[in-house]
Image: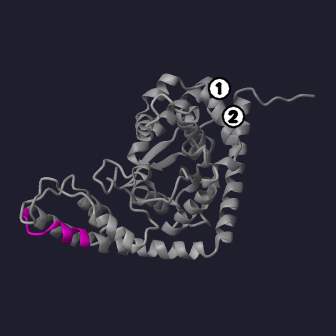
Amino acid sequence: MAKRILTGDRPTGPLHLGHYVGSLQNRVRLQHEYDTYLLIADLQALTDNFEHPEHLNENVLQVAMDYLAVGIDPDKVKIVVQSMVPELAELTIYFMNLVTVATLERNPTVKEEIRQHRFGRAVPVGFWSYPISQASDIAIFKAELVPVGEDQLPMIEQTREIVRRFNSLYSEVLVEPKALLGAVARLPGTDGGAKMSKSLGNCVYLSDPPETVRKRVMSMYTDPTRIHPTDPGHVEGNPVFAYHDAFNDDRAEVEELKERYRAGRVGDVEVKQRLCAALERFLAPIRERRAHHLSNPVRVREIVLEGTRQGRAVAQATMAEVRAAMKLDYKFG
């Protein structure tokens, strides 16, 4: 049996270039080698949308379309909706007894997201516990490999700790997963921030039309120490060149631009224009595939329902083992 991948996204909006280099690229690359499950984590998205849960209905379908648009093959990959697999909630409750509040408080990913959401002390319990829910997602599918961005590494390590504790206390039922980082550890935001994030509004989305991409690229931060186009510029740490490295398929052009930029022989406008062209080459086929699936939403729903059916069967089999290991498989009568 092929080894298994489990990864996914919270349906809080469309997916962006950061998602692609962080995880989607690896999912597409490995889908024919691994038994792959992609989880649309709508229950975890409720931590941001509990006041307006109706927003998730459309977002679930949009995320599924983004998966198909980047090249996910529905004949190979199972797309699963988290809330339609109730066994995940059951395992989350069991896992809650294996994690301390102090451990959750130390999680750097959670701490950063709390800061971004400006929760202060009013952090919803659901938000605190979503790393445990994420551990349940991975463990219930017995995933050996989890393609993630760099910011998710603490989550995977927390999952590994929970799995080790479960296996030690009860029985060797669950699998300790390994993280697989994308080709680009962390894609900066268009504002020069350390991370592209929906909540910060510094993203280029996979579904953005050409004029929107151009507007975002032309407003991107570059080298703050460079005043004139003839000034020698810094390539390292320059967001525009980070995007060139990630998405420009003309490697000779990228190296030539870097050489000219360092020597003060090319301006920011030309470098950004070349990036616009490179992103258009990358995004045009994605938009085309997305338009195809957008024209047939019934088929997309069928793909999601079938993937969820297969995913739930795996979850049910794992939970039978979990309950037996915990002596919770009551047999009355």
Residues shaded magenta: 263-273
Q: Residue at x 11, y 57 (%)?
A: 226
Q: In terms of secondary structure, where does tag 1 sit?
A: loop
Measured from the top left, where is residue 222 in percent x and y? 21, 58
Instruction: Residue under label 1, please give it.
Output: 170
- Within the magenta stretch, is there residue 271? yes
Circles 2 and 1 in contact, beta carbons < 8 Å: yes
Measured from the top left, where is residue 47 in percent x and y? 56, 41
Which disc is residue 322 wearing?
A: 2
In this view of the protein, can residue 263 be seen by the observer?
Answer: yes
Residue 28 higher or lower than 104, as above or below: below
Q: In terms of secondary structure, where does tag 2 sit?
A: helix
Amino acid found under the numbered disc labelled 2: Val
- Within the magenta stretch, is there residue 65? no
Quadrant of the rendered image containing residue 250: bottom left
In this view of the protein, can residue 142 be seen by the observer?
Answer: no
Residue 64 higher or lower than 177, as above or below: below
Q: Residue at x 48, y 28 (%)?
A: 121
